[in-house]
């Protein structure tokens, strides 16, 4: 059976603002590609433009959306029509049957019932090959529509080229920002019967029943879009392009082979494997000499080298990149090169690029991405030196009114914590900065910067400044060193990010032994974890003053105060193993994986966030989790399948129940155990 057949790209799409089952988009897309494609069923829902239960469709969206909260950019909608031209979305939408449609990583097949037209699509890295089959006698049409902002469309009936651009962007881009698109149709075009304007185009096609459309995009120029079209699609049939996409997906999905008799487990596992290969998106292109270069979203210039975007490191560093280290080390290395190029372009390492830096979430968690790649030998030399320079800059240089860098750097250096009376989410910022300091120390040590390493190992202990022994939680301090007089362990927000004291007080990934000592020893720490997992999932809206979806998801999942829907709780089950209580880790990991995940449209316990929840499930399934990216250590749990085989270039890594020895294993020991 093809591994693609196990994948449900609709997994997690049954979501909305108030309750997330994943907040995903069903991408038909090449791995880590620049261009993705999804049905658009309702543009009124903005970031939630696809609902698996809708029976109306507005077209197929070319999309880059990493999250409905971040929104989309560089998007247009493609829609086959027949008969009269319709532009307005309320006039043009068509009925369709979701159960009769095919949505796969490599292939899309949708019947637009109103227009008696079938659209098939198979993706390339920067475009797609589209096949339209018209079944009515009415005028065949190709509709192109903007989602927002500026849109142009030029039609050349002599060459069959359709080209234009959109300036759609959710965050402020450089002045000359645009996504250019070009399409080549293999039939004639009737300009007299076409409509074309800033609200969209409905292009009359001179054909009988079938048309092939080859499409490519560029963020550099129209000339580059045409070159991308030639590089990726020239001389290729629809079936050839689909075979290429199929082959690429099968190879990546097959990086981990699992043995289980549970069909649903297979479906869930490989749907998650698909998800971890969607983000970050490539943002670079190749010139005539096959050299990579990219549009710089900071100043609008074109610069040399690779670039990656659309990834929130606060979410992904915890699970995605430690998994990449096991199965995609070469891709991981190139991604870090892209992030370092981002630093060279803008002066800062990225926090949440989309495609420029959004600056969302606390901390500078790319520190974990870099340190993990460094200690595992994935990056070194000049690349590591450049990355280290960027890490030092955001740890030491104050920045204000900017999405870049750490917020409150001067105060953190002064007080050893972020003061609660000056900054929002002060506990999370402090803990994330302390962890980031540890990551800097790890890289400094590798580079022989012993003095720098010693200084940052020391500041990595700053988490201790916020521990309240009376309550057993991390709590914010003001500039006078005082905690608030009133304390509610169930109140969210304020000093905490997307959670409260229960969810955020254990974020000391780099020094669990030190955290255990603050509680008085392993027994007391185990008792605190027991209280966390067995407390009712109560919450107070706290400083948010309203319910946020993570609260609703925690109480519906009911794993106590372990809000597995959100990243700060990801590592909690493995803390038991780190105190010598392996059976409780095994229990909670298995329970959460089984009850919290499925391959259905409601398949995630919260926001999937660029592969982070998918990677969590994969790591839980194979029995390895990296509590501290930036260390080589993976903490073990009992594998949830009979056997897992990780296929790497240097040999196969086999994991089964018999390989469970000890509560942890190092990355290098894992790699050395591969069978060649």
Image: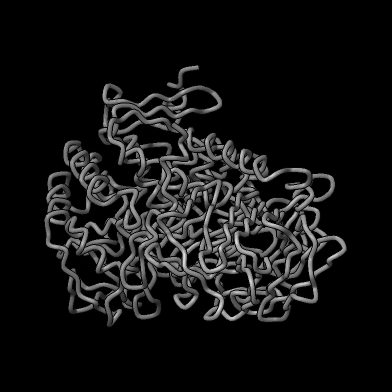
* Residue depicted at 44% across the width and 40% down the height: 5
Q: Residue 102: give x, y in percent of width and height.
A: 48, 51
Q: Is residue 193 left or right of residue 478?
A: right
* Residue depicted at 40% across the width and 77% down the height: 423
Q: Residue 256: give x, y in percent of width and height.
A: 44, 33
Above or below, 133 against 18 in this view is above
For the view shown, which residue lies furthest in the front direction?
A: 137
Above or below, 488 against 572 in this view is below
Q: Residue 21: give x, y in percent of width and height.
A: 33, 60
Q: Is residue 594 left or right of residue 646?
A: left
Q: Residue 320: give x, y in percent of width and height.
A: 45, 47
**Can residue 353 be spotted in the picture?**
no
Q: Is residue 288 left or right of residue 396?
A: right
**Can residue 236 be spotted in the picture?**
yes
Which color scheme does this rendered protein use? one colour
Quarter of the figure with the N terminus: top left
């Amino acid at each position: 059976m093809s591994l693609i057949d196990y994948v449900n790209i609709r997994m997690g799409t049954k979501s909305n603002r108030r309750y997330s089952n994943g907040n995903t988009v069903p991408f038909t897309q090449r791995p880590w590609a620049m261009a993705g494609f999804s049905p658009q069923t309702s543009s009124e829902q903005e970031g939630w433009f696809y609902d698996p239960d809708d029976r109306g469709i507005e077209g197929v969206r070319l999309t880059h959306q990493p999250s409905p909260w971040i929104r989309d950019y560089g998007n247009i909608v493609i829609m086959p029509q027949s008969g009269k031209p319709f532009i307005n979305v309320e006039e043009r939408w068509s009925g369709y049957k979701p159960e009769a449609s095919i949505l796969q990583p490599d292939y899309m097949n949708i019947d637009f019932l109103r227009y008696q037209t079938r659209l098939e699509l198979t993706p390339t890295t920067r475009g797609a090959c589209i096949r339209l089959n018209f079944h009515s006698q009415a005028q065949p049409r190709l509709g192109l529509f903007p989602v927002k902002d500026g849109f142009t469309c030029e039609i050349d009936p002599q060459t069959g080229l359709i080209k234009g651009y959109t300036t759609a962007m959710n965050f402020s881009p450089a002045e000359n920002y645009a996504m250019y698109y070009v399409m080549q149709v293999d039939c004639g075009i009737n300009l007299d019967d076409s409509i074309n304007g800033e609200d969209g185009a409905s292009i009359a096609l001179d054909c009988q029943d079938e048309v092939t459309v080859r499409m490519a995009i560029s963020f550099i120029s129209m000339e580059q879009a045409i070159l991308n079209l030639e590089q990726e699609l020239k001389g290729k049939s629809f079936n050839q392009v689909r075979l290429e996409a199929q082959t690429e997906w099968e190879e990546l999905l097959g990086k981990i082979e699992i043995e289980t008799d549970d069909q649903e487990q297979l479906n869930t596992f490989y749907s998650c494997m698909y998800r971890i290969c969607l983000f970050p998106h490539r943002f670079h292109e190749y010139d005539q000499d096959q050299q990579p270069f990219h549009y710089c979203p900071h100043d609008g210039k074109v610069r040399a080298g690779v670039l990656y975007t659309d990834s929130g490191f606060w979410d992904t560093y915890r699970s995605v990149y430690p998994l990449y280290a096991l199965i995609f080390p070469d891709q991981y290395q190139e991604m870090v090169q892209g992030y370092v190029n981002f630093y060279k372009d803008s002066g800062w390492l990225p926090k949440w690029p989309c495609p420029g830096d959004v600056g969302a979430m606390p901390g500078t968690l790319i520190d974990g991405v870099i340190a993990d790649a460094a200690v595992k030998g994935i990056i070194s030399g000049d690349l590591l030196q450049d990355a280290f320079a960027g890490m030092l800059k955001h740890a030491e240089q104050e920045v204000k009114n900017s999405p870049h860098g750490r917020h409150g750097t001067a105060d953190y250096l002064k007080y050893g914590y972020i003061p609660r009376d000056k900054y929002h989410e002060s506990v999370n910022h402090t803990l994330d900065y302390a962890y980031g300091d540890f990551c800097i120390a790890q890289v400094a040590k590798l580079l022989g910067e012993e003095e720098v390493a010693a200084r940052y190992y020391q500041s990595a202990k700053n988490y201790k400044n916020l521990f309240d022994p009376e309550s057993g939680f991390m709590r914010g301090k003001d500039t006078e060193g005082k905690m608030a007089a009133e304390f509610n362990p169930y109140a969210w927000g304020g000093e905490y990010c997307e959670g409260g004291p229960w969810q955020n007080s254990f974020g000391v990934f780099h020094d669990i032994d030190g955290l255990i000592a603050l509680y008085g020893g392993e027994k007391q720490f185990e008792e605190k974890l027991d209280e966390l997992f067995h407390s009712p999932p109560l919450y107070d809206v706290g400083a948010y003053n309203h319910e946020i979806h993570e609260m609703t998801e925690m109480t519906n999942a009911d794993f106590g105060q372990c809000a597995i829907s959100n990243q700060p709780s990801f590592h909690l089950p493995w803390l038991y193993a780190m105190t010598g209580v392996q059976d409780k880790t095994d229990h909670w990991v298995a329970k959460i994986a089984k009850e919290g995940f499925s391959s259905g449209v409601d398949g995630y316990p919260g926001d999937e966030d660029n592969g982070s929840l998918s990677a969590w499930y994969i790591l839980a399934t194979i029995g390895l989790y990296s509590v501290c990216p930036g260390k080589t250590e993976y903490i073990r749990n009992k594998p949830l399948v009979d056997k897992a085989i990780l296929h790497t270039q240097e040999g196969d890594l086999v994991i089964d129940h018999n390989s469970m020895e000890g509560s942890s294993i190092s990355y290098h020991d894992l790699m050395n155990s591969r069978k060649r």
